[in-house]
Amino acid sequence: MSLGFLSQTILCLLSLLTLSSALYFHIGETERKCFIEEIPDDTVITGNYEVQVFDRNVNDFLPSTPGIGMHVEVRDPDDKVVLSKVYSSKGRFTFQSHTPGEHIICLMSNSTQWFGAGQLRVHLDIQVGEHAVDYGQVAEKEKMSELELRVRQLLEQVEQISKEQNYQRYREERFRLTSESTNQRVLWWSVAQTCILLLTGFWQMRHLKSFFEAKKLV
Amino acid sequence: MIKLVVFCGLLSLVVGSELTFELPDSANQCFHEVINIGEKCTVEFQVVTGGQYDVDMLVEAPNKQIIYKVAKKQYDSFTFDANQRGVYTVCFSNEFSSFSHKLVYLDFQVGDKPSLYPDMGEDSPTLTQMETSAVGVYTALRDMVDHQTHHRLREAQSRKRAEEINKRIQWYSLGEAIVILVVMISQVLTLRSFFQEKKIITSFTST
């Protein structure tokens, strides 16, 4: 039991190590940064983030600032809000997609400062689908052997690929519909413009003829 | 159990970040990462939508030396070995464009690609036949996922362009039709006004 607890503690510490070695970027305190994830439906996305505030006194980013919070908003392809929550300065958010398409993940700090807004360093790591699964936990929960765990990992990977293929079919259909619509539009607008040209030309001639006849010039 | 812990630990040291972000016009966006000595890194980017589908990219080492710089590229992949420990920076610049914002996909891979048995090498003799086959399947699937991602990005590029064309056709054609009508009517009105003026002049000269 103690070994289990120890390994869990080590796991926690190592997951912290993951975050501090993730990609990071700088944004203003009141700035909003969005990322786009194009995913098939029924896919789980997990995002780990950490926010550090720039301290002018030290002229460096503080290792951890408990006061600042991060507002995470996720929108689905139909522009509906899937997730909108304020998390602490370090956390993880998870959501599952119900429609295939482009999901927009927006991060903004909940700082209310208007003047002297500083810079924020945001560490971010977004994992999609089977990369988001924690196999350590799965193995512990279901008491699998090493090989069984690996096979499970392969199965998840294959499932993810299959979902992506399905999504690819859906995208291709959308593309085809768009092309067909463009084809139709080009046809009908060309016909319409030709008709307008002919009709107005005809009207011009008739109008001018009657105008000149009235002026007794013809 | 210990193996699992080690597995999870090593998993955390293999970092691959994929991000798709919007780069506004005349903007510069940088991403930083702490990399250890000797790690092999790959930076790959692709412009999905926007303007001429090009961005400037540069990779900076911790000593502020620029190790890679490329201008106005649509897609590129750069691999380098980290020869010093520190913060490496990848910057994308859209400063040459004043009105088209770009959608850029970035893939920053640090360390080797994730493997099924991270604590053992892939050709390690301690793997059984079954495990070796599993590793083979995993590698093939991993490459398949890469191909799928590239395919999806290219397809997204074409599809967004097609949707843009579809919208533009509607508005441009409507505009054109209105312009034709306006030009035709104003032609007639201008012509009429020529003759009316003449009439006034002749009536003045006669009186």
Image: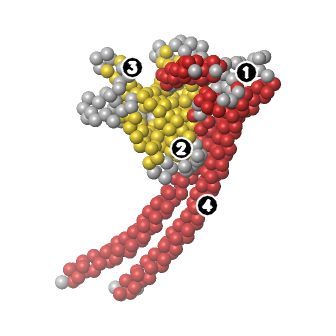
Please state the horizontal and vertical placement of residue B60, each as a whole percent of the image: 49, 20
Please state the horizontal and vertical placement of residue B106, each as a whole percent of the image: 54, 33
| Residue A25 occupies quadrant | top left
- Answer with mark 2 or mark 4, whichever residue precedes in sequence: 2
Query: Mark 2 and mark 3: span between their CA atoms?
Result: 31 Å
Q: Amino acid at mark 2?
A: Gln
Mark 1 or 2: in front is: 2
Q: Residue at x 49, y 31 (%)?
A: A48
- Residue occupied by mark 3: A63
Q: Residue at x 62, y 43 (%)?
A: B152
Please state the horizontal and vertical placement of residue B111, each as a whole percent of the image: 60, 21
Most foreground residue, B39 or B71: B39
Most foreground residue, B170 or A207: B170
Q: Is residue B118 visible?
A: yes
Query: Mark 3 and mark 1: span between their CA atoms?
Result: 37 Å
Indicate whether B122 appears above or below A162.
above
Mark 2 touches mark 3? (CB < 8 Å): no
Mark 3 touches mark 1? (CB < 8 Å): no
- Residue occupied by mark 1: B122
- Residue occupied by mark 4: A180
Please indicate whether residue A112 sits to the left or right of residue B160 in the image: left
On what subunit does the disc labeled 1 rest? B
How many neighbours does mark 2 have within 10 angstroms: few (below 14), some (14-19), or many (20 or more)? some
Q: Is residue B68 visible?
A: no
- Answer with mark 4 or mark 3, whichever residue precedes in sequence: 3
Query: Mark 1 and mark 2: span between their CA atoms?
Result: 33 Å
Q: Residue A96 bears which disc, if any?
A: 2
How many neighbours does mark 4 have within 10 angstroms: few (below 14), some (14-19), or many (20 or more)? few
Quick check: do tags 4 and 1 share a chain?
no
Circle 4: element type = helix
How many neighbours does mark 1 have within 10 angstroms: few (below 14), some (14-19), or many (20 or more)? some
Query: Mark 2 and mark 4: span between their CA atoms?
Result: 32 Å
